[in-house]
Image (cartoon, rainbow, N blue to C red):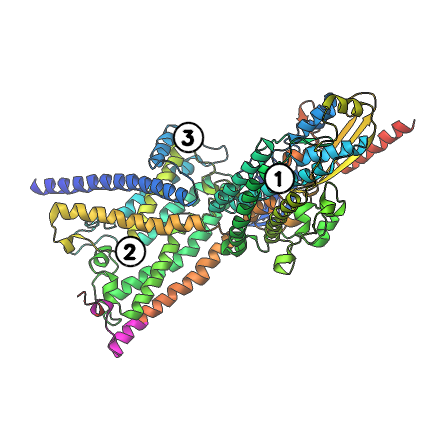
Amino acid sequence: MLELQEIIRTVMIIILSTVVLALFGIFFGLLYKGIDRKISAHMQGRIGPPIRQPFRDVGKLFTKENIIPENAVPWVFNLAPLIGLVGTISILLYLPIGGFRPLASVEGEIIFGDLILVLYLLMIPSLALVIGGFASGSPYATIGAQREMATMIAYEFPLAIIIITIAWKLGSIAAGGLGVENAFTLTAITANPVWNAVGPLGFIGLILLLLVLIIVTPAELSKIPFDAPEAETEIGGGLLVEYSGRNLAMFYLTDAVKTVVMASIIVALFFPYNLSPLLGLESIPAYILDFIFFLIKILIIIVFSVSLIRVSVARLKIDQIVYTYWVPLTLIALVGLICIMWDGTMMESYGWPKIVEIFGLI
Amino acid sequence: MKQTATTKTSYHIPVGPIHPALKEPVYFEFEIDGERIIDVNVKLGHIHRGVEWASRKRNPIQVLYLAERICGICSYCHPAAFSLAVEAAADIQVPERAEYLRVIQGELERICSHILWAGVAAHEIGFDTVLYFTWQIREKALDLTEYLTGNRITKGIMTIGGIRRDITKDMLPRIKRDLQFFKDNFEKLRHIFLDDKTIKMRSQGAGILTKKDALKLCAVGPTTRASGVKKDVRVDTSYFAYGDLDIDYITPDVLTGNINGDVYDRIIQRLLEVKQSIDLVEQCIDEMPAGEIVSEPKIPKLMNQLKKVNGEGVGRHEAPRGEVIHYVKFNGQTENPYTWKVRAPTYNNILPWIPMLKGEQIADIPIVAASTDPCMSCTNRVAIVNNNSKYELTKEQLHKMSVEKTRRFMK
């Protein structure tokens, strides 16, 4: 009986935490969307909508009629937004939020999910958009879906290079890394900031990788200059052209949550630092402080990778997007990879110090 | 649906009549292969309002205000061309000062229109920051227009035989200050449009109109000048005071050294024209002679004079989009014009769309279509309706009908 109670308790905790995480993702996703709109409006010399505008938009959309076009395949058309939202929220389970461990990681031997899984899960919302676009039976949506697929293929490669490089650097002892076990898990990556493992050359490499990751983010989120799949002036909203009411609201939420997810991944990979160890705080105050610090980090990343980029450039054509990712950005990512590789050799053969040792942080 | 034996690789997409890329209704039918445009068909007539028909119940002064409402942005050039046509028919001499004032208004409209276009073009390629920036400058131009004419858009400044408002000495400092503002911001605009990497990526090599095509299809205005055709009514016919001013054809090679005829060249062309317009306004302010501003200030007297006119006249004016032509005929019996025909510049710039768009990508459609600065409400003069449904006439049908009509006349 006791065991059963234990199981029920664990299951209840997991369900409750998932609900809390989903609410967290949706609330802060919409909040950051509002802040992003306000900031970019000010950069464009406008006043912009109030920060609570995205909440109002979603509330309004949920009350609106949900139109299914005549040519659409109704069950796929209705299922796609749901898959997108669920898929995005499920990524949150694998990410460390502030001082909290990822929900899906259990201490001990069993570790659910790592960066490779997150990489796959990140494709689900995009795939949901593509499926929904094809299912809506509109020529504009079809063009949008084709473009989304091309974009996806384009940015996955540099993204994979970044993730693998970091995990490899942390995991291998030969490359001057820290020899972390299970280096692909986010728990391990956040516990051992990658900046601690590199020397001067690797530092340059990491900066390059961070740059590439920041440029991959707008494509992942379909923001200007990589918003060809939705291009309003070209194909009138593209993938989403036939969506309305509840379904559109769900895609809107997917986009909002995805923004938080992408920023959290950047935080976990590059800025996993917390304030509480520095101030010597523990338990609840530490959690609160780390959580606030985490929100600020996410805000800064969103401002740099979404707001700043989208106000300062024009939209690219789909062939230009694919070229940008496959040639310049892949090359930069590879140069970063090579820098980090040589970094290990330099440390081993010539005894180059690590960055943290130079500054005497450890 | 019929199944064809071979696999069809191309598909149709409709753009318009209502589409975010289009500011006014026009219907494009594209045949697309992947992202490439194979064929394009343009259909017009969605915004026909019967303006010419409405003129039959109005006297020339009333038509002036009707002409103003043909189009919002061209609210000066239509009355200007109409006035030129009526003045030609009635043989009215315009005072010299009025000619200079007319140039100032015309060039101010060009500044407004080109800057508005620059914002729209930026919006079409997803660069909204530039849209807001350019429209802030346009706001200043509209303020100046309001200061000079009393209105911002439909100015009501033109009249037959002159102009309705003078520019007095105490107005000059304000005008000079605003012109200086345009000059300062012009440099910023030039930098944004000509040096920005993404704008270059989107506009260079897109929507090419060769000089040969531009000549063959009779393109007008900045569209044709950007392809290297030296065609400008202001220089060619020297109406208003343009003959006394220092003005020459502008083509994009002034700045870049060569002419490609692409969207980038059209951007350069319009920016250079804004600069030229600022220069022309300054020249006018310096050289303007004193004197009357209208040949006949009493409207009833003028109306009486026009009533007796029996003849026809053509007015040509270089509007921001190109040459606008108005044809007016009076029969000397009624005070209303017997005929009034408007040919707006966009009419000539529709056919060049086809060579521009063929072979381009879907993503190029908005910016290429916008690059001629189309103005549909100016252009739409015909809608063929039978029993409340629209139908089309082919070339053969039209030819047959023309022959029949000629036979009828010959009887």
Q: Which residues are magenta?
A: A342-357
Q: Quadrant of residue B234?
A: top right
Q: Are marks 2 and 1 in contact (CB under 8 Å)?
A: no
**Badge 3 element:** loop
Residue B259 point in image, percent of width and height:
65, 57
Number of on-image labels: 3
Q: Quadrant of residue B15?
A: top right
Most foreground residue, A8 or A294: A294
Q: Residue at x 76, y 34 (%)?
A: B85
Left or right of A326? Residue A264 is left
Q: Quadrant of the N terminus of chain B?
A: top right
Residue placed farthest to the right in the image?
B411
Give residue B109's mark. Answer: 1
Above or below, A197 relative to B96: below
Most foreground residue, A187 or B180: B180
The residue indicated by pointer 2 is A115
Q: Residue at x 59, y 55 (%)?
A: B205
